[in-house]
Image (tube, coloured by chain):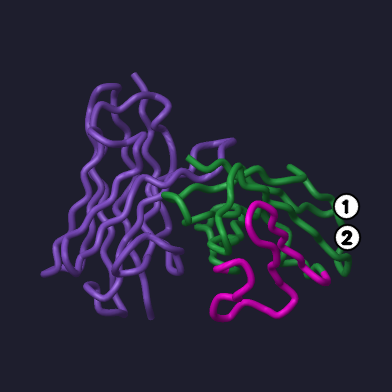
Amino acid sequence: EIELTQSPATLSLSPGERATLSCRASQSVGIFLAWYQQKPGQAPRLLIYDTSNRATGVPARFSGSGSGTDFTLTISSLEPEDFAVYYCQQRNNWLTFGGGTKVDIK
Amino acid sequence: QVQLVQSGAEVKKPGASVKVSCKSSGYIFSTYGISWVRLAPGQGPQWLGWISPYNGNIKYAQRFQGRVTMTTDTSTSTAYLELRSLRPDDTAVYYCARDDRDDYYYMDVWGKGTTVTVSS
């Protein structure tokens, strides 16, 4: 099973700042990586798929990059509604998720 | 609009079974697959498996093989998850999510979740 390690566990930032979230895979997943956002009491929401493609309705401030084992989700300028938990997910070898990064307000 | 509506919360004793339903609307049920994912407190999401209403293909995550059964009823556009031999560490919110018709990929529409509590 491919393990996904997300860092940092918590990211404390202010609105307007840039957020950079990392996801590292225990073996290559190619480009087959997605990012989800989850807010308290809600289901996860697909943000990015196949490393860099934004899902329908996702604002352009969200972008994804990487390949192989190292991936990044960048939020260019945090809006108040972006404070949430973010998970990465791979589908290259079965399907697994990372443990999450919480982006909270500094 | 596209929706997945899940059944209500369940409380079960260890060793029991639970069956969660997920009714779709707003799209043609057989043109997409359904994945099941659970979220336990303090943990990352765990994928339980995927089913295609189109052809009945199923893939179960290895850790749940033998304890899980996924089914669909195309006449009511409903998917079902049954988990047996429940343990306290099965306590989690269980989600159904729309996936690809032909294999598990990414999940673009999610139900609101069903809380399953396992406690003696």
Q: In this view, does A5 lie above or below A47?
A: above
Residue denoted by label 2: A14
* Residue farthest to the top, as pictured: B120
- Residue in the image at 76% along x and 65% along y: A74
Q: Quadrant for residue B5, please give it.
A: bottom left
Amino acid carrying mark 2 in the image? Ser
Q: Position of residue B45 (x, y in %)?
A: 50, 45
Quadrant housing the N terminus of chain B: bottom left
Q: Position of residue A40 (x, y in %)?
A: 60, 52
The answer to the question of whether label 2 and label 1 lie on touching residues, with beta carbons closer than 8 A, is: yes
The residue carrying pointer 2 sits among few (fewer than 14), some (14 to 19) or many (20 or more) residues within 10 Å by Cα, namely: some
Residue denoted by label 1: A106
Quadrant housing the C terminus of chain B: top left
Relative to residue A61, is residue B62 drawn left or right?
Answer: left
State the extent of the magenta-drawn residues as a range: A49-77
Disc assigned to residue A40: none
The residue carrying pointer 1 sits among few (fewer than 14), some (14 to 19) or many (20 or more) residues within 10 Å by Cα, namely: few
- What's the colour of chain B in the image? purple
CA distance for labels 2 and 1: 5 Å
- Residue in the image at 43% along x and 27% along y: B89
Q: Where is residue B104 in the image (x, y as percent from the top left)?
A: 37, 60
Element type at mark 2: loop
Q: The green chain is which one?
A: A
Q: Quadrant for residue A31, please give it.
A: bottom right
Q: In this view, does B68 lie above or below B75?
A: above
Element type at mark 1: loop
